[in-house]
Structure formats: C-alpha cells, structure tokens
Image (tube, rainbow, N blue to C red):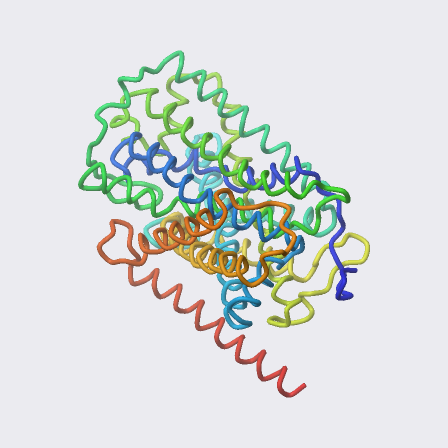
Amino acid sequence: MDEQGMPQARRTLSLWDFFNLGFGAIVGSSWLLLVGDWMVQGGGPTAVVVASLLGMILMAPIACVFAELATARPKSGGVLEFVERTHGRRMSSLVGWAMILGSGVVAMWDSLVLSVIISQVLGGMPAFAWLNAVRLYRVAGTDIYLLPALLADLVVLYVGHLNLDRPQDSARLQLVLSYVQLAGMLVVLGVAALRGSPDNALPAFASLSGASVSGADPPASLGMGVMSMLCVTPFFYAGFSTIPQRSEEAAEGVNWNKFGKVIAMTLVASAGFYIIDTYAFGTMVPWTEFVARPLPAIRTLGELAPRVMPLMLVVALLCPIGPMNSFVGATGYSLLALARMGQLSQGLAQVDPLTGVPRDAIRQAVGVALVGPFLGAGVLAPLSKVSAFAFCFAYLVVSLSCLRMRKLDPTMPRPFHVLGGRMGVLAACVASGICMALLAVPLTPSSFSAAEWAIVLAWALLWLVISLDGDGRRSRA
C-alpha cells in the first residue's frame, strides 16, 4: 500500500531491467522493416542519420524532465500528479489520455508489424506460401491474411499472459530480446564491413519515388528530408516514457538518481543503435539500389550473405515483441494511473494482491494490441504520426509542469535534476513545441492529413465524453 492506502505493484525491477524495458521499447523491428522507407522519406541515409541525431538532442531534455518528476514521485501516474498540481484535474486527465493513445498505438503498431513480417517475409518464401492462403480483405492498399493476423495475435496473447501472471518473466523476456537485437546488429555490421563501402551512401541526397511499406513520400531537398524524418522521431524514441510509468515496480533500495540516468541512457543508446543501423544498411550496396528492393534490409542480407538469413529471420520475427511487451505494460499502467486519480473506472485501479499487476488495465491494453494485425501495413505511417503527436502533447504539458514546480515547490526532494536546471527544462518545453509543430503546421513535409486529424479529434472527443461522465458520477456521489 502507498501512503494513500492504494495497493501498489510488486517492487522487483532492477535498474538493468528498466534499461532493457526502455531500450526494447525504442529499438523494435523498424531498424529491419522500415530502414529502406526511412531512406526514401529522408532522401538517403545521410538525412536519416542527421534526423536520428537531432531527434535524440530534442528528446534528451524531455527524457530528463520525466526522470526528474518520476524520481520525485516514483509511482504509476506520479508524473500526472504534478500536472494536476500545476494545470488542474482536467489537463492531467487529457495528458494521461494522450499517453494512453501514444502507448496503445505503439502496442498495436508492433502487433501489426509482426503480422506484416509473417505475411511478407515468411509468406513470400515458397515453403511458407500457405501462410497467405486465406485473404480476408484489403485495407489502405494492403491485403490482410488470416493466418499471419492470427499468429501475431497469439504472440500478443502470450505477451499479455506474461504481463498479467508472470511479470518477472516479462522482464527476463525483455533482456533476451535486447541480446537478440544486438546479435542481429552485429551480423548487419559484419556484412556491411565485408561486402559494403562508404561510397554506397552517396549521393548524400536523392529524391526517389516508389512503393514503401509505410507509404513514405520522397522529399524535395536534403533539409526537407531531415525535417520529414524528424517528424516521426518522437514516435520511435517514445520508449523512454515506459520507464517512468513502471517506476513503482522498482526494487527496494534502488538508487533513484541512477534511475533517472537510466532513462536518459536508454535514449542515447537507442539513438546510437539507429544511427549505426542506418549507416550499415546504407553502405552495403548503393543506397538507391537498396531502397528499390521490396523489404530491402531482408532482401539485401539474403543476397549478400544467404548463410545468415535463418538467423536474421528469427531476429526479424522476435524484434516486434520487445516494444509490444513494453507498451502493453505501459498502456496498462497509464490506465491504472488515471483510474487511481478517479478519472476512469475504479475497476482499472485494482491491483492483484499476489502479482501486484493491474489485471483489468493490462487486459484492456492487450485488447488494443489485438486489433493491430487486422489494420494492414498501409496504416503504419498514419499510426506513427498520430502516436508521435499524442506523445509530444504530453511531453509539452509535463515539461511546463516541471518548470512550474520549480517555482511552486523549489525545496521538493528531487533525486534527479534536469541537466542545465531551469534552462534544461525550458529546452524540453521548446523541443516538445517544435515536435508538435512539425506535425501540426500544414507547410511541414510530414504534416497531418485529414484522416490523421480525424483520429486525433475522435480520440479527444472520446476523452471529453468520458471526462464529463466522470464529473457527473462524482457530483452524484
């Protein structure tokens, strides 16, 4: 129980567990499935590398803000409590709702990616063509096949089982998957070193058109390419936010200053992974030829090093499970946080006395992830942009709350302080605003389409209905 008499999650996770939770949430399958799309969207590997670095720089102060507030109030929803203190109950509810949208979309996105890999990579092999024998329907330009969707959902159910009944095994799974990611990257680096050349990364910019998994459009210049990629980096780096949402599971005696540093280290390590990955694939063969292949990372590895393909197929199939595992838990704990604050049904606030798991909240998160495989690869890009916008909105309000708390309660114990003090917090506010503007301002290369705005507005309307209903229930009580 906490000081308010609310049941808490079991405190079993070490700092290393938290690092793997965040790293696995950031580095999923996109480094294999979407690296070719990134090069098309950015106009080459140069733009992707620059955008990955700039994205890390923008997100670093935001990660530090979350670290400061999470270590000051280490519990699920602790960050939202500061938003409520500084901006009121309604805004804290909206921020929590945005975090649920962002996290839920990532969980759904990764289950969808897994079904795409099963269908397009395995199903594209003659021995596994039977996987695509039953076509259900076509949506957003892509076919949905029954068996890949069902197999992906079986994995979702297994991940849900671990989060519900075996949370320690869920943490161990994340560790194993991190090692799988690193093993896959070592193979990629080896192939690039033996068969590739730095000259293959030239030209530094080229505007290419062609089909891609995510529907990426080619940019008009290198600068526009960098900006286009920068728009989606908040989505791919959002995994650091899973750590604060699980902070109350930290083992007894944890060093909270180091806990805060782990959040920032996760972001830096993941950015380095993306940069190395882009350089390796961008130099294996001339990148303009690389992106012309369907699923270019897999196809290129198969052509240059066919002996490693069995291993890389296993890596490709396992990669989406890491972020799925992290974000199913993060979505569940976000629901738990809002329920504890009286902003959602109290059933979601119940914690299992044996496992310390919010069972109903996790079940809701699993239900969201189960939808993903039936959406089709054509919605990958819209989903990532909507999720990025939701996260950036939450980042902005949380950063403003952190800034205001410096005035409201300057003596509050803060085991971790944002680097640069007040200026560092201001940098987080500016960075969040920039990321939101890149998606919301119509003149930017990756600005929202009408359909993407419709998703955001529908989610906001749903929040308003639930919020007003909650106000009504509280007033009647």
Give the image location of residue 140, x and y in percent. Answer: 34, 54
Rendered position, 171 above or below 246? above
Left or right, 367 with respect to 207, comes to: right
Q: Quadrant of the N terminus?
A: bottom right
Instruction: Specify whether 449 is left or right of 82.
Output: left
Depth check: 123 or 49 in front? 49
Q: Is residue 321 visible?
A: no
Furthest residue toward top: 194
Residue shown at the point (51%, 25%) measured from the top left: 184
Q: Position of residue 444 (x, y in %)?
A: 25, 52
Examine the rendered structure and indicate whether residue 254 appears above or below residue 2: above
* Residue found at x 36% / y 38%: 54
Q: Residue at x 57, y 28 (%)?
A: 180
Q: Is residue 181 above or below residue 165?
A: above
Residue 231, image x and y in percent? 34, 47
* Foreground pick, 123 / 218: 218
Residue that sits furthest to the bottom in the current view? 476
Q: Quadrant of the C terminus?
A: bottom right
Q: Give the residue at x 64% y 88%.
A: 476
